[in-house]
Amino acid sequence: MPALSSRPLSWLLAAVVAATSVGAACTPVGGKRYSRSLAQKSLSKLEAPGLIVGEFTLTKVVDGDTVRVDGLDASLRLLGMDTEETFKSESNRRAVETDWDAYLREKRGKFRPGRIETPTGEVAKAWAKKFFDGSVRVRVERDHPAEIRDRFNRYLAYVLVEKDGKWLNFNVESVRAGMSPYYTKYGHSRRYHEQFVAAQAEAQAAKRGIWASGIKNYPDYPERFAWWGPRADFIDAFRTASEGKDNFIDLTHWNAMKLLEEHVGSEVQMLGVISDVRYAERGPARVMLSYRQFRDFPLIFFDRDVLVSSGITDKWKQEFVWVTGVPTIYENKHTKKKQVQIKIDSASQIRLCPVPGLPPPPALPTAGVGP
């Protein structure tokens, strides 16, 4: 999209000022309300497995990497990109204006880089609004038929817009414009990897957006890449090993729980993200893997030494783990509720994704498979 990508950063900053000055006078993209029946029709399209979801009416640009369509209450979380955060509080905005370096030190993640509100996040939102201006109709696609929603219930998607008779991938064009890096924290794009790589190289060479000098943006992209890269490779290894095997289960997939229930009593290989590590004075320790809010999947450790030997600690929260085990059904004797779980009897059942700055995971066998 040369007309937008090649414009200087000063134009984008001016767009932010203009967007802020009109305030409530801005008309939401789409500009119309939707009936319950239309919303339900859109929902049915978004919930159905498949790569090409369909065409929708864009209703709102939430920020640089989140949009809404067709009156649905859940946003689209755009894949392969992650723009910097827009300002949610005036105190952060003032802190940036007062002392940028002090603001960065204060907001630095405890172990690894985190999400920070920056002026560049506002730039990305303004660029997204400009990109979609006049393009109410969009096409929504997925990276994998079973990857429908994230932990926070947002739909995972690529959004394409038709301009001058050609469908442009907003996700890729955002990277080309320097509004976002190619975001591989949750894996490489299966469908558009080469396009993302080329788009980022073009943006870096042209020093567009986040790659420009003298702007207030994340100063630690090299550190982020060093973190995201091993994660993406770890995920790729699982995907490669899973080809043609129905006992490999990715917890990001909409049907993961159904597949685990179908494999109760037989061994599975499972990929998940550690959401919490729960120690107990009585009873087993639990390592919870992200699935849905308030519905995570438990790994059960009756032997505390096994948990220690596995290498899992609080510092591994939000990192990937590859698990070998046999799903079983646990019934709470008080509530009578049933839950699928996997008991971990040996540290060899756990394979942790390597993370810069954390101790290397123990070199353990993984029942004949592994990254």
Image: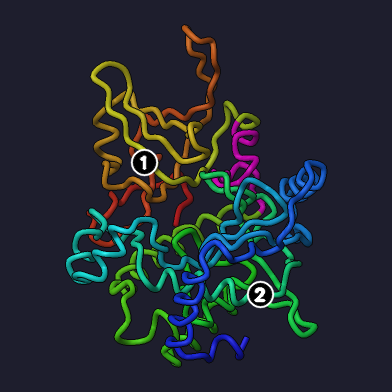
> Can you give x and y, in whole percent of width and height, for residue 37 in the image?
82, 42
Q: Is residue 31 magenta?
A: no
Which contiguous range is marked in magenta? 244-260
Tell me: 118 left or right of 339. left
Crowd around label 1: few <14 · some 14–19 · many ≥20 (10 Å):
some
Residue at screen point 59% across, 76% down: 130
Tell me: 187 left or right of 366. right
Three-letter amino acid code at the position of disc 2 = Asp
Contact between marks 2 and 1 (CB within 8 A): the answer is no
Q: Is residue 249 magenta?
A: yes
> Can you give x and y, in whole percent of width and height, for residue 252 in the image?
55, 47
Q: Residue furthest top?
A: 334
Crowd around label 2: few <14 · some 14–19 · many ≥20 (10 Å):
few
Three-letter amino acid code at the position of disc 1 = Ser
> Can you give x and y, in whole percent of width and height, for residue 13 in the image?
43, 81
- Kindly identify which residue carries mark 1: 348
Identify the disc placed on residue 288.
Answer: none
Identify the disc placed on residue 133.
Answer: 2
Whether residue 181 is visible, yes or no, is: no
Q: Pick the residue in front: 32 or 3.
A: 32
